[in-house]
Image (cartoon, rainbow, N blue to C red):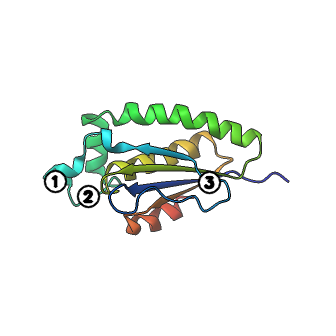
């Protein structure tokens, strides 16, 4: 019986918790720094929102380089996902960090999970928002 590839995606804060630890025996995975993308948290109307909110998503999609950033990430992670699937690997961790773990990293984690679920339905995906714990309840039901 073939084991399923589980892809664990985290959004995190470089200032608070730092890069999430990989609790599997594999150690490692991808870490993407979202701080090079314009921060919607510096705009008053988005300060209390997260990357899960429509206003922040529209800002990131239309006023920043986020679409190009994510397209590049999708190309890069696809190489490993396809390799891992062909070799029956069981775990891959993908992490997105930004200053507060609220806007850019949350958005990136959500959009990357959607991409993986659509392109690789044979993989199991879970999303963990390390600084936005209230979002974890909704991400669990997405699996």
As measured in the structure, the alpha-carbon distance from the residue carrying label 3 to the one carrying label 1 is 39 Å
Q: Are marks 1 and 2 in contact (CB under 8 Å)?
A: yes
**Label 2: element kind:** loop
As measured in the structure, the alpha-carbon distance from the residue carrying label 1 to the one carrying label 2 is 8 Å
Between tags 3 and 1, which lies in front?
3
From the top left corner, tell me how far across and down residue 112 is, in percent.
49, 44
What residue is rendered at 40% in x and 64% in y?
135
Mark 1 surroundings: few (<14), some (14-19) or many (≥20) residues within 10 A:
few
**Label 1: element kind:** helix
Quickly name the residue at label 3.
27
Quadrant of residue 132 within the rendered picture: bottom left
Q: Are marks 2 and 3 in contact (CB under 8 Å)?
A: no
What is the quadrant of the C terminus in the image? bottom right
Question: From this viewpoint, which residue is outermost toward the left?
Answer: 44
Quickly name the residue at label 2.
49
Quickly name the residue at label 1.
45
On screen, residue 79 above or below 118: above
What residue is rendered at 52% in x and 59% in y?
142
On screen, residue 142 above or below 104: below
Question: From this viewpoint, which residue is outermost toward the right?
Answer: 1
Q: Which of 139/37 is in front?
A: 37
Q: Is residue 121 left or right of residue 43?
A: right
From the top left corner, tell me how far across and down residue 110 is, in percent.
44, 50
From the top left corner, tell me how far across and down residue 30 is, in percent.
53, 45
Quadrant of residue 126 within the rendered picture: bottom right
């Amino acid at each position: 019986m073939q084991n399923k590839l589980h892809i664990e995606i985290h959004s995190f804060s470089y200032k608070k918790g730092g890069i999430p630890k990989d609790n599997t025996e594999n150690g490692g995975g991808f870490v993407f720094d979202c701080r090079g993308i314009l921060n919607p948290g510096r705009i008053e109307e988005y300060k209390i929102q997260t990357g899960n909110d429509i206003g922040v998503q529209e800002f990131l999609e239309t006023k920043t380089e986020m679409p190009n950033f994510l397209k590049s990430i999708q190309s890069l992670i696809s190489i490993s996902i396809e390799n891992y699937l062909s070799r029956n690997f069981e775990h891959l961790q993908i992490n997105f960090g930004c200053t507060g773990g609220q806007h850019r990293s949350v958005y990136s984690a959500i959009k990357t999970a959607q991409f993986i679920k659509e392109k690789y339905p044979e993989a199991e995906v879970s999303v963990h928002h390390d600084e936005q714990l209230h979002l974890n309840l909704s991400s669990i039901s997405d699996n």
